[in-house]
Amino acid sequence: MTAPLKLGAVVITMGNRPDELRALLDSVAKQHGDRIEVVVVGNGAPVLDVPDGVRTVDLPENLGIPGGRNVGIEAFGPSGRDVDVLLFLDDDGLLAGADTGELVRQAFDADPRLGIISFRIADPETGLTQRRHVPRLRASDPMRSSRVTTFLGGANAVRTEVIEQVGGLPDEFFYAHEETDLAWRALDAGWAIDYRADIVLLHPTMPPSRHAVYHRMVARNRVWVARRNLPAPLIPVYLGVWVLLTLLRRPTVPALKAWFRGFAEGWRTPCGPRRPMKWRTVWRLTKLGRPPVV
């Protein structure tokens, strides 16, 4: 008999949702099986009023989503090695069932090459899952689990061996597409990613554009993802497709101006180390239904 996988959880907060944070931590504490160790990172704000046993890290400034989560990873030792799997949970989310931890353990136990699990996100009032929360192109049936090529940032579980092998989230992204960057590196290293419809995080439905920096950073980081990860011939194809898709969505004029400012910024600013994926990874992504041109 092998010991059950040891789980940890990383939650970042800006201190503006104390009630929701407390509810999330309570839902983690109620999980069946061995206790899940939790670290809450205050991203530029102190962490107050958490249950006993929850560790906290207060950062003097907001490092962004990937930066804050990376601090949480390191709180579990280098690359999170004190645990086998880390859950990354939004501070206004809520684990839907007390069996989430056990489902995560079972999934990773059953498949040693499974590196990342993307949870299903459902609205707590309606139970509905938005199409954009299903990380695949064929997203009409959110209740279908499948292999995928990316994952959802605030509702996932990552084997810490993946982080040790390919590194954490890209700090410089601050917000948007950091999950795709990590997913592509993990897939290139031979790991698999699953979307699991039966592992649910309840989260209120909100448009991503509520963030003031949304349009600029989405565009800038799209360029950075391509520059960091794609073989050179695919970079203009990938970015050309996204320019076209952005125009087809008919954003407002201010949003479009912000998007193109971010797109230009992505070309003229450093994006971090370039490690182009292997062509066999391109083929693998294509077979999974999402070639790295869209």
Image: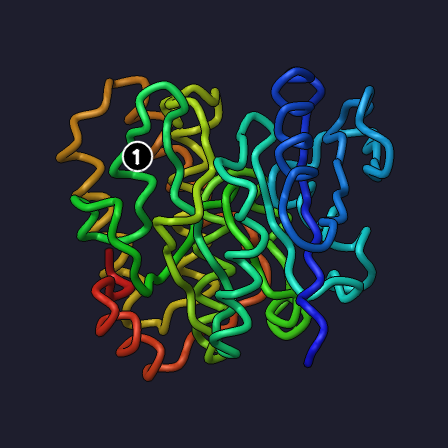
Binning the other alpha carbons within 10 Å of mark 1 as few (below 14), some (14 to 19) or many (20 upward) gives many
Point out the image quarter for the N terminus. bottom right
Q: Quadrant of residue 133?
A: top left
Q: Which residue is mark 1?
A: 129
Estimate the x, y position of residue 36 in percent, counting from the top left: 71, 49
Q: Is residue 15 above or below residue 165?
A: above
Q: Amino acid at mark 1?
A: Thr
Viewer-side residue, 73 vs 181: 73
Viewer-side residue, 211 vs 144: 144
Which residue is depicted at the point 75% across and 43% down?
38
* Residue at the far left in the pictured view: 248
Element at label 1: loop
Estimate the x, y position of residue 50 in percent, counting from the top left: 80, 26
Q: Is residue 81 above or below residue 264?
A: below
Applied colour scheme? rainbow
Estimate the x, y position of residue 214 in percent, counting from the top left: 43, 29
Which residue is depicted at the point 32% across and 65% down?
147
